[in-house]
Image (cartoon, rainbow, N blue to C red):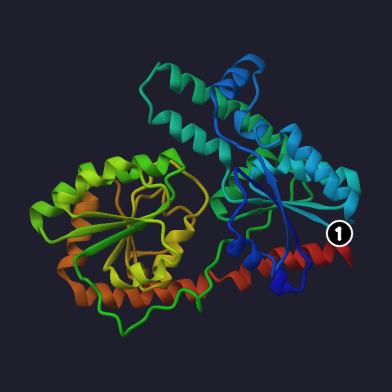
Amino acid sequence: FYKCGIDVTFFCIAEKMPEKPLLDEASQYADIRVCLHSTRNTSLRIANSLLLNHSIYIRKHFHKKIKEDLFRLLKEKKFDAVHSDHSCMAPLGILAKKTQNIPLGIRLHNIEWTIWKRYSENLPKASPKRLYIEHQAYLLKKAERLLYSQADVLFPLTEPDKARALELSPNSEAIFASAGVDLDDWMPDKSIKRNTKELVLATTYQWIHNVDAVRWFITEVMPLLRSKNPDISLTLIGKNAPEWLKQYKHIGVNTVGYVNRVQPYYNRAAVNISPLFVGGGIRIKILEAMAMQLPVVASPIAAEGINASQEDGLFLANNKNEFADMITMLINNPIQAREIGTYAREFISKNFTWEKNVAIMANNYKERLS
């Protein structure tokens, strides 16, 4: 938004204050306001959600402390519009909309209730946890229907999510504005030689579905790959990696942990993987990998919203055998894999740039205020 000529105040929630270099960098583009608050699913929150029959996902982001901080900001500054990221921030957006009588847009990174529903379907039938998650999906669906109806505009990242949003709230205005990549920042370095047998995965371990995906790939797919080629390795990047990952070093799993820049690791690898089976929206990490000229092997859910083919560098795999077969094919044909990688970057350049997609939202707000 800053690059579109819009003055931005960024109100966000964090469990602890971000490091000063990060705040200093972000402050170049926006007035950063951090509300310190934990959104962990504690036992008390789970119990309250059962007792009061509410969506834990929505309620934990609408805490008294957060509302007090937001009210102070609204008294301090007058805004032209409010832009809420994710459904969980929409109640705060509605609060700002009503307080200052300004238009509200909600950025739908995904339709949250569908994620909870998919999660429940992967749990044992009739288990207490599955019953709880199923009911939470139902409550979240009701909440999202109400939230969407109170927004002036919805900005879904994918066409499937646009359809889902309008199914919940048929009278809403929903404008498709996908995610994007800064192509200058995600530029492959051709002087660096690729390791033709290295896979790479960058993720966050704070989300249980990402952890489950990594565990599944290591235990189910890596043995198949190593039986065909014992030199195949997997590099895992991400903050707060679980300790148990270290026990798989003997099968070529290298846990790097947090890094300042992912690009050098993408630049060195041969194939990016995304084995997610619960989720929604769009995986920006897939877009970034493709921009770095990496072919990507992903589950259909992980690749949702990215209408790319194998010729564009995106290979869909539904199970462990398909993952192993496609990865092995790419590893065994490094020249072809590199050529496919160039097509992947071309695809991202044509379809997923921030300039194009942020401008859609920025222009919509400007039109409302003109």
Q: Position of residue 84 (x, y in %)?
A: 71, 50
User: Looking at the picture, which amino acid does disc 1 mark?
Assistant: Asp
Tell which residue pokes out farthest to the front in this image: 20
- Which residue is painted at 23% across and 75% down in the image? 336
| In the foreground, 255 or 139 | 255
Quadrant of the image containing the N terminus:
bottom right
| In the foreground, 229 or 116 | 229
In this view, 297 is above or below 75: below
In this view, 6 is above or below 125: below
Q: Residues within 10 Å of mark 1 (few under 14, many from 20)?
A: some
Which residue corresponds to mark 1?
Answer: 80
- Which residue is painted at 67% across and 17% down in the image? 52
Q: Position of residue 121 (x, y in %)?
A: 41, 29
Q: Position of residue 251 (x, y in %)?
A: 15, 50
Tell which residue pokes out farthest to the bottom in this image: 191
Q: Is residue 252 left or right of residue 171?
A: left
Asked whether residue 354 is in view, the answer is yes
The kind of secondary structure element at disc 1 is loop
Marks counted in the figure total 1
Q: Is residue 104 left or right of residue 226?
A: right
Q: Position of residue 359 (x, y in %)?
A: 69, 70
Q: Is residue 27 left or right of residue 217?
A: right
| In the foreground, 285 or 71 | 71
Q: Is residue 248 left or right of residue 29?
A: left
Asked whether residue 101 is in view, the answer is no
Quadrant of the image containing the C terminus:
bottom right
| In the foreground, 311 or 91 | 91
- Which residue is painted at 56% across and 54% down in the image? 159
